[in-house]
């Protein structure tokens, strides 16, 4: 969309619904920064979107709905045994891994080790702690879903920006990058299992 033809009142509701591409999202965020009055308008749309789930009347769920859905998707029912991490479950409503039970595993990328915290076979999202040695450049890859990184230690160079402990990075679906580190680093990451690592950097 030509930026001269963009209209905040049309794009703001789509922003609140997370339906814009990265360029359009950045345009909306720039407008809010340049005109603080628009922030209130955008917040109104975001509040309305947050109420949408409560507007629909409750629908009783069939007792076998989960089993039928898994059958249709060709997935086996997920049980505690299906989780690859050595976690503990003090009650059925939670999952935990103690720091002493954390198991570092070599990654396919030399100089990288990971701890798999949780694999969600339904959403295809994976939570990991990643430790990267100094001088490593990660291969160029494209994100199938959202990627979230929380820096724990060291420095990570991502698209020319240096991120340090305490920094949070969120990459949108279809974005591409090849992060690197001069010093080594460690971070918590949540990313899609279906990210594409078969890209050519040239």
Image (spheres, rainbow, N blue to C red):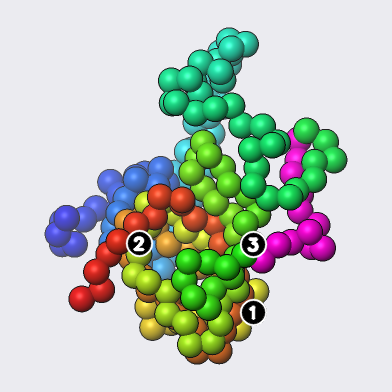
**Residue shown at 70%/62% (left/top)?**
103
* Dot 2 alpha-carbon crowd within 10 angstroms: few under 14, some 14 to 19, many 20 or more: few
Report x, y in % for residue 95: 74, 44
Task: Give the side of residue 193 with respect to residue 21, left or right.
Answer: right
Report x, y in % for residue 70: 51, 23
**Residue shown at 62%/56% (left/top)?**
116
Splitting the image into 4 quarters, where does residue 26 fall?
Answer: bottom left
**Residue shown at 37%/78% (left/top)?**
159
Specify the label residue 176 is tagged with: none
Which residue in the structure is indicated by mark 3? 115
| Magenta-colored span | 93-104
- Magenta stretch: helix, strand or loop mostly: loop
The span from disc 1 to disc 2 (Cα, nearest Å) is 25 Å
Report x, y in % for residue 111: 53, 78
Specify the label residue 153 is tagged with: 1
Task: Give the side of residue 200 with respect to residue 181, left or right.
Answer: left
Splitting the image into 4 quarters, where does residue 166 fall?
Answer: bottom right
Report x, y in % for residue 167: 58, 74
Quadrant location, the N terminus: bottom left
SS at circle 1: strand
Viewer-closest of 91 and 57: 91
Is 158 magenta? The answer is no
- Going from N to C along the chain, the mark reached first, 1 or 2, is 1
Note whether residue 106 is visible. Answer: yes
Q: Which of labels 1 and 2 is toward the front?
A: 2
The span from disc 1 to disc 3 (Cα, nearest Å) is 15 Å
- Going from N to C along the chain, the mark reached first, 2 or 3, is 3
Which residue in the structure is indicated by mark 2? 197
Q: Which of labels 1 and 3 is toward the front?
A: 3
């Amino acid at each position: 969309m030509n930026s001269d033809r963009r209209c905040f009142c049309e794009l703001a509701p789509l922003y609140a619904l997370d339906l814009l591409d990265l360029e359009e999202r950045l345009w909306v965020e720039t407008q809010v920064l340049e005109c603080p009055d628009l922030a209130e308008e955008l917040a109104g749309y975001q509040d309305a979107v947050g109420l949408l789930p409560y507007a629909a009347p409750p629908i009783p769920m069939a007792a076998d709905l989960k089993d039928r859905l898994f059958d249709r998707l060709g997935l086996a029912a997920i049980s505690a045994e299906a989780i690859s991490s050595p976690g503990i479950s003090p009650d059925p409503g939670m999952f935990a891994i103690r720091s002493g039970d954390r198991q570092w595993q070599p990654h396919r990328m030399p100089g990288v080790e990971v701890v798999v915290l949780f694999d969600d076979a339904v959403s295809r999202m994976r939570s990991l702690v990643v430790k990267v040695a100094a001088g490593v450049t990660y291969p160029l890859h494209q994100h199938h879903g959202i990627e979230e990184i929380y820096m724990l230690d060291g420095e990570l160079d991502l698209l020319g920006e240096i991120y340090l402990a305490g920094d949070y990075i969120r990459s949108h679906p279809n974005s591409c990058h090849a992060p690197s580190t001069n010093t080594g680093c460690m971070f918590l990451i949540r990313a899609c299992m279906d990210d594409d690592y078969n890209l050519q950097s040239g």
